[in-house]
Image (tube, rainbow, N blue to C red):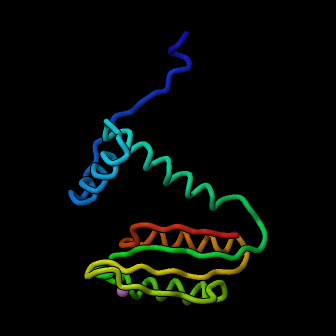
Amino acid sequence: MWSALAKRYERISMTLPSDLLNQLDEVSKSIGYKKRSKAIRDSINAFISDYKSLRGEKGKRAGTITFIYEHEMPKISDLLTDVQHEFSKLIDASLHIHLNEARCLEVLAVRGEFQDIRKLAETLMSLKGVETLKATLI
Ligand code: NI
């Protein structure tokens, strides 16, 4: 009856930017992973776990939302400004760092209801051009 407990797998095909795949392979190699698919599975698990950490809790929280974005993505700067104005009651301060020619890092100091902060984080994550987002709330 092993088959009843065995995980089911599905094969997917995807297209990724070469530099992203190169970075994944570099990190995998330095950790000692032998298979690329494990690195991709672990990345997906980290993505899901990050998102789940933003769910379900009520009450007032304070913390930071940190994200990296491609500043040359069309309209991204305007969209980020619009979102931050829309959620201005939650954002106490922001810090912008021009990482290199293509990327910017932004840190928002946030304070407010957990559900509202989550909504802000989700709105930022959904923008095309935002690559990585981490919320740390205490
Ligand atoms: Ni910048």
- Residue located 77% across and 65% down the image: 58
Q: Does residue 126 lie above or below 71 as drawn?
A: above
**Which quadrant of the rendered structure holds the N terminus?**
top right
Residue 73 point in image, percent of width and height: 30, 78
Q: In which quarter of the image is residue 72?
A: bottom left
Q: Does residue 8 lie above or below 63 as drawn?
A: above
- 71 and 103: which one is in front? 103
**Which quadrant of the rendered structure holds the C terminus?**
bottom right
Q: Name the side, left or right, on which 40 lies relative to 1.
A: left
Residue 45 point in image, percent of width and height: 49, 47
Q: Name the side, left or right, on which 20 lies relative to 105.
A: left
Residue 8 point in image, percent of width and height: 46, 27
Q: Name the side, left or right, on which 71 lies relative to 95.
A: left
- Residue located 58% across and 89% down the image: 93
- Residue located 57% across and 68% down the image: 135
- Residue located 42% across and 79% down the image: 105
Q: Does residue 98 lie above or below 123 as drawn?
A: below
Ligand 1 lies in quarter: bottom left
